[in-house]
Image (cartoon, rainbow, N blue to C red):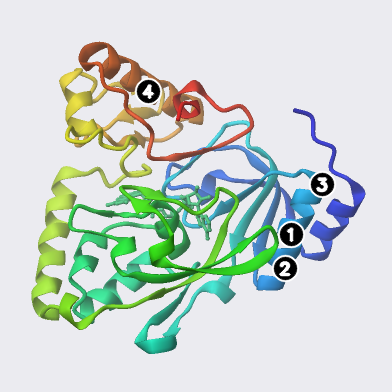
């Protein structure tokens, strides 16, 4: 689709000091991807509201980037606007009714550490997940031991250029799913830990340590976006890909990890297309061998959506 960037939009971008044609690869833990037509670091709610309205008016696609640890940028890049929340959204402070008020650009590791130290048991399941709080909420990140939604009480967002706030109970959260509308920008959230969910912090800290050791042995530490596919309950994507004999399968710089078959890694010099080709191969082979459809957990950002990411 040819997009006409009208002068008013370009002027707005310039007034907000947006960058043009900024390379996206450094913003993704997979380290692949072409440039963004516009790249904006936003530091106020009013700027975000203004920009969201302008994107709608000028029909410019917007992608919200946080830690990029679950994101695959296409080799061609993105013709729209990539918006990243700036340092003004990196905070943890006391919120209402003994909740923590956490900015969406705060690292999830920082919130996890604080929550474990407060004795919140479910936060043990958050440990080891990279990225920022906004991305973690959007993905309902975590493990079987605990997901982000377990600690959330309220989410503050911008939608259609307006500020809105949702009680956690009114958002549909499930495994790697958050029911907020697609073009929602999460700006902050409240976390509240009820007394009955609190345990002994030292015990939890030990659990996190043990879990870190286990992870080191079972998951690759080089460039990846974590689990590539969602697990098709009750099966595990990694086990299925392994049974399909694809563990270690390599294409140029990309590889289905030898350590964990649900991780596709960039060993250096991979293109987004190599990663997509390996993901497609895994999806097809698993379907042909076991009749199960693997659906990507990672998010794709680009102009032409590959079949791998197209099906719902
Ligand atoms: C080594 C490694 C281990 C991992 N382990 C785990 C794990 O144990 N459990 C797990 O669940 N995941 C895991 N992941 C995947 C990833 O870290 C999580 O999905 C993480 O929560 C994504 O956060 P992010 O800030 O990097 O999001 P991004 O990749 O930047 O974004 C993810 C999605 O959220 C959207 N988004 C981001 N910020 C906002 C916002 N403020 N408002 C609205 N939408 C937003 C983006 O548009 C995108 O669609 C792992 C990844 C790696 C690399």
Q: Residue at x 83, y 64 (%)?
A: 15
- Which residue is drawn at the image coordinates 13% and 72% (left, top)? 204
Q: Are marks 1 and 4 in contact (CB under 8 Å)?
A: no
Label disc, if present, on residue 254 of the rendered structure = none
Mark with earlier residue (4, 2):
2
How far apart are the two marked residues, 3 and 2, measured between alpha carbons? Answer: 16 Å
Q: Which mark is residue 51?
A: 1
Q: Residue furthest front?
A: 170
Q: Dot 4 corresponds to which residue?
A: 278
| Among the two numbered marks 1 and 3 on one chain, the one whose residue lies closer to the N terminus | 1
- Of badges 4 and 2, the one in the foreground is 2
Residue 160 percent coordinates (x, y): 68, 57
- Checking the image for residue 58, the label placed there is 3
Mark 1 surroundings: few (<14), some (14-19) or many (≥20) residues within 10 A = many
Left or right position of 55 against 123: right
If you read the primary sequence from the N terminus, does the residue marked by circle 1 or circle 4 appear first?
1
Tell me the distance, in whole angstroms, between the alpha carbons under discs 4 and 3: 36 Å
Q: Choose top left, top right, bottom left or bottom right for residue 75.
A: top right
Q: Which residue is mark 2?
A: 47
Q: Callout 2: helix, strand or loop?
A: helix
Distance (Cα) linking label 4 and label 2:
39 Å
Q: Position of residue 58 (x, y in %)?
A: 82, 47
In the image, residue 7 lies at what x, y percent?
A: 91, 49
253 shown above or below 153: above
In the figure, is residue 16 to the left or right of 277? right
Q: Nearer the viewer, mark 1 or mark 4?
A: 1
Q: Is residue 160 visible?
A: yes
Image quarter in which the C terminus is found: top left
Q: Does 130 sit above or below residue 219?
A: below
Give the structural element (helix, strand or loop) at label 1.
helix
Answer whether labels 1 and 2 touch (C-beta < 8 Å). yes
């Amino acid at each position: 689709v040819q997009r006409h960037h009208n002068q008013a939009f370009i002027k707005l971008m310039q007034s907000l000091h947006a960058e043009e044609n900024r390379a996206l690869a450094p913003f993704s833990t997979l380290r692949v991807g072409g440039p963004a037509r516009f790249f904006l670091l936003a530091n106020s709610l009013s700027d975000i509201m203004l920009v969201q309205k302008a994107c709608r008016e000028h029909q410019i696609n917007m992608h919200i980037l946080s830690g990029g640890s679950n994101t695959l940028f296409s080799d061609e890049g993105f013709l729209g606007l990539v918006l990243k929340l700036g340092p003004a959204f990196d905070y943890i402070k006391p919120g209402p009714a003994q909740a923590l008020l956490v900015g969406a650009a705060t690292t999830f590791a920082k919130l996890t550490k604080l929550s474990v130290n407060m004795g919140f048991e479910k936060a043990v399941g958050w440990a080891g997940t990279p990225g920022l709080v906004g991305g973690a909420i959007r993905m309902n990140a975590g493990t079987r031991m605990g997901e982000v939604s377990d600690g959330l009480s309220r989410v503050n967002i911008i939608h259609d250029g307006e500020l809105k706030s949702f009680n956690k109970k009114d958002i549909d959260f499930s495994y790697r799913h958050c029911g907020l509308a697609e073009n929602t920008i999460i700006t902050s959230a409240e976390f509240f830990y009820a007394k009955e969910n609190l345990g002994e912090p030292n015990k939890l800290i030990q659990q996190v340590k043990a879990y870190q050791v286990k992870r080191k042995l079972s998951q690759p530490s080089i460039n990846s976006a974590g689990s590539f596919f969602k697990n098709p309950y009750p099966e595990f994507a990694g086990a299925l890909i392994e049974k399909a004999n694809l563990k270690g399968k390599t294409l140029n710089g990309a590889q289905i990890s030898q350590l964990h078959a649900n991780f596709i890694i960039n060993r250096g010099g991979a293109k987004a297309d190599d990663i997509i080709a390996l993901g497609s191969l895994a999806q097809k082979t698993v379907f042909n061998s076991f009749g199960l459809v693997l659906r990507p957990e990672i998010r794709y950002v680009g102009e032409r959506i590959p079949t791998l990411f197209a099906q719902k």
